[in-house]
Image (tube, rainbow, N blue to C red):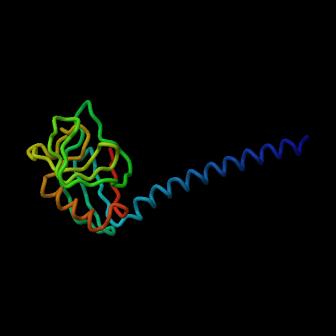
Amino acid sequence: MVSGKVSAGCAAMRWSALAFLLAGVMLLSATAFADAARLTISIDISAQRMTVKADGRVLYHWPVSTARPGYRTPVGTFAPYRMEREWYSTIYDYAPMPWSIFFLRGYAIHGTTDIAHLGQPVSHGCVRLDPDNARTLFRKVQSVGMGQSRIVIRP
């Protein structure tokens, strides 16, 4: 009987240790995913700022516009999956989205004609940039490759 209780206790401890280990591996994997990128595009929603780093070296700091109240910009780490030099919103009156870098469903980083509001949350969820900066970013992602680029969005 006593050995049965000890075995059950040991099994519970083993499961706890395994769960702890798996949580650590998942955290390291998410960090490694971002760290493995040659190009990291970090967006700070609260500051409405983007920082672009290549191999850990800061290249650019730019103002952005993310989601206005009632909409959301997704938070997390993403890989670009599609790039379009010229694109028009299929949801919002065919609004121009030049230099689009899509990272989740219809969400993209793209240029905007509304540069007066950069630095303020005014979009429907995409990350808006000055068109010149969007072009620079687009070309940088092209040169490095989408597979070597990560987009990290924080609240």
* Residue in the image at 24% along x and 50% along y: 109
**Residue 89 drawn at (x, y percent):** 20, 41
Return the residue nearer the eye: 86 or 32: 86
* Residue in the image at 16% along x and 57% along y: 133
* Residue in the image at 72% along x and 48% along y: 13
Asked if residue 45 lies left or right of residue 1, the reply is left
Count numbered badges in the picture. Answer: 0
Q: Is 100 drawn above or below residue 60 in the view shown?
A: above
> Which residue occupies the extreme top position in the image?
70
> Which residue occupies the extreme right position in the image?
1
**Residue 145 drawn at (x, y percent):** 32, 65
Asked if residue 64 lies left or right of residue 26, the reply is left
Dividing the image into 4 quarters, which one contains the C terminus? top left
Dividing the image into 4 quarters, which one contains the N terminus? top right
**Residue 57 drawn at (x, y percent):** 29, 69
Return the residue nearer the eye: 100 or 56: 100
Return the residue nearer the eye: 24 or 2: 24
* Residue in the image at 16% along x and 35% along y: 93
Location of residue 99 (image quadrant)? bottom left
**Residue 4 drawn at (x, y percent):** 87, 43
Asked if residue 21 lies left or right of residue 31, the reply is right
> Which residue occupies the extreme left position in the image?
116
